[in-house]
Image (tube, helix red, strand yellow):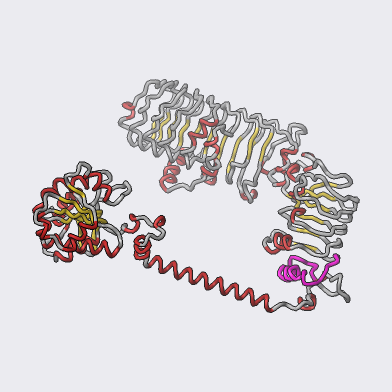
Amino acid sequence: VQGLSNQYLSLQNLTQTYFKNFTALRQLDLSGNNMRMLDANIFAPLTQLNCLILSRNEIRELPESLFAYQRQLLVLDLSHNLLEYLTPHIFEHTPWLWQLKLAGNHLHDITNLMENLIPLNYIHRLDISQNQLQTIWSTKTSVNKIPRLLTKFRNSMSSVLEDSLNYITKLQPENYESDKINSTVINLSGNRLREFTLDWLTCPFEINLEHNLIENIFSSQNFSSTTADCGAKISLTGNPIVCDCKLAWLYSENYRSLFNGSQCVQTSTNFEQLERKELCEPVMCPSECNCYTQFEFLHIQCNGAQHTSIEQLPRPEQVGLKSSVLDISNNNFTVLPLNTTFGYGNVSQLNASYNKITSISVSQLPTNLTVLDLRNNRIKSLNAEFLRTYLNDSTKLQFLYLSGNPWICDCSTQQLLYTIRTHRTRIPDADQLLCYNLPNDTRLIDNVRELCTTPVKVAYYQNINATVISVGLTIIVLLCIIALFYKYKLEVEVWLYSHNILRFCISECELDKHKTFDAFISYAHQDADFVNHTLLPQLEQCEPPFRVCTHERNWLAGAYIHEQIIESVDQSRRTIIVLSQHFIESDWARMEFRTAHQCSLNEGRARIIMIKYGEITKTDLLDKELRAYLDMNTYLDWQDVRFWDKLRYAMPHKRRGKKSSDMLKTNGRMYVMGQVEMNRLREEIV
């Protein structure tokens, strides 16, 4: 059984037991059954459900886990119930939901609604008509920061979703037109909305806003650049829409065709028949000027008005436009208005010809200027900032007219000449620029050698070349020094540290970071019990723990002893000598001391920690080298009450960190680092 209809049977106390034999059910209709409460697990057996209809009941609240097992649910109809809000996370387990009907309830909290819609990435049909919504904007910032509503809903459908949709559309072909299966349809009719914005709409869409209280429609940006192919439809019948300046964007963006049948409340004029002048006229138009709209610009015509300055200008936003065209030609301006003048920043085309302007500053020009006409003024030169901002570093200024000005042609004009030659296509009258200080109508674009009589100083360029070469060589030398430093970084740091140079830049941890062990314990085999049961546990189990190398645990059987001594000392940050009578009598132990002592001398740092263990009776057996070391250095006495504190202080000062349990390989040999690694090694051998 794939479809089951139990309409108007007063089934009020259903549980999951009722559906336990319908696990393959894909469509379930329980409308009109006077159901008030639903068991949280009532639909648990129906994991294949695609369509669920619960309309025309008396449901007031939905359990959070009601749809926990309906991951393939596509259509959910909860219309005409008594819902005042949606239980949080109610749709967390229905990611494929394609149609949601909530019409005819008592929903009023848009934040609650929007938060529950967030998981629904594939929804294309949303009906929340005949509720009590007053706005589509949530008061909760986090909700408003989600992607624009319909943009979020426009994810492409997977093959699984398409197959299930085909099943639904075959069952109800009259409700789903095949050519509109991918368009988004939202029904907000019959609510209490007072305003609406188009900024969260993307094509194609159909939206029903009929019979609300909408007075204003806003659009701060063009939501579609191809409205002709958008396939969009907006229904606004039955709303008291006020046609004033707030609606002027409707005309400029040519959106009127989207609102078929919509009328202005004041005049009952259809939107399609609106004229711009019926919406509003620009305000703050300067005296003796004519302000009007034409094409996509607000034109401010002030030519021949005998103005010397302008204090404010109308802004194009008043009439739903984005930029203005200002004509102040044939006036008495000596300087242009500042770009902080109200409305002046929206000017994209400026005609200031036939005035008395003597200079041009960047602070006097709008930033988005595309056309500038400065013909027939009193400009003698253009400053470097203007040339850089509006010509060399920007392509916004498309046309610049400069003829009819008394240009001074000398060496100071070189930059202007180079700029004109570079951007000649953007200066249409470049051939008409004449030098005021030269006879015979000399043109500004003539050869620079004819304009600049002062010879170019060769020494100036020689100085530039010398500077460039010096800087280049300095950079090369610095790069070589840096490369050598990184290649021999360890050797350099050891040398600096041992000679007490820049020690604040070098830490001992950094010098020894390549070493595997914190300490190598050198002892006679007769003292193994003291090392293994007393010394090692205290060093390896303290905080932070130390990595310790010993003969018995870390050396490889059969390898050369001399080679392993050298390697153990080299790979350890300290060498701990357990000095006892047995140590003095051991040839190998004395060799370990000499190796450690020689390494310490080579690096110029104290690396040996001497521990006196037990009484030494036969001092005559001491090597000269060992005797000299004892005479020159202090040692730790095992009987000292502060022995462990002094030993830990003599050890490397480690930072706390997690002890690695990896098997480490050094020079091709595998070392076991501690008890944890020993256990791991045993497991690998087994």
Left or right of residue 444: residue 77:
left
Whole-percent x and y of residue 579? 15, 54
Q: Quadrant of residue 52?
A: top left
- Which residue is found at the position 83% from the left and 62% from the top? 379
Left or right of residue 26: residue 475:
right
- Closer to the camera, 568 or 611? 611
Whole-percent x and y of residue 46? 35, 34
- Closer to the camera, 120 or 363? 363
Whole-percent x and y of residue 88? 45, 30
Q: Quadrant of the N terminus?
A: top left
Residue 475 against residue 98 in the figure, above or below: below
- Which residue is found at the position 35% from the left and 28% from the top? 41
Q: Which residues are magenta?
A: 404-430
Q: Quadrant of residue 618?
A: bottom left
Whole-percent x and y of residue 311? 82, 45
Q: Quadrant of residue 281?
A: top right
- Examine the rendering and report whether any part of residue 424 can be seen: no
Residue 302 against residue 235 in the figure, above or below: below
- Which residue is found at the position 51% from the left and 42% from the top? 153
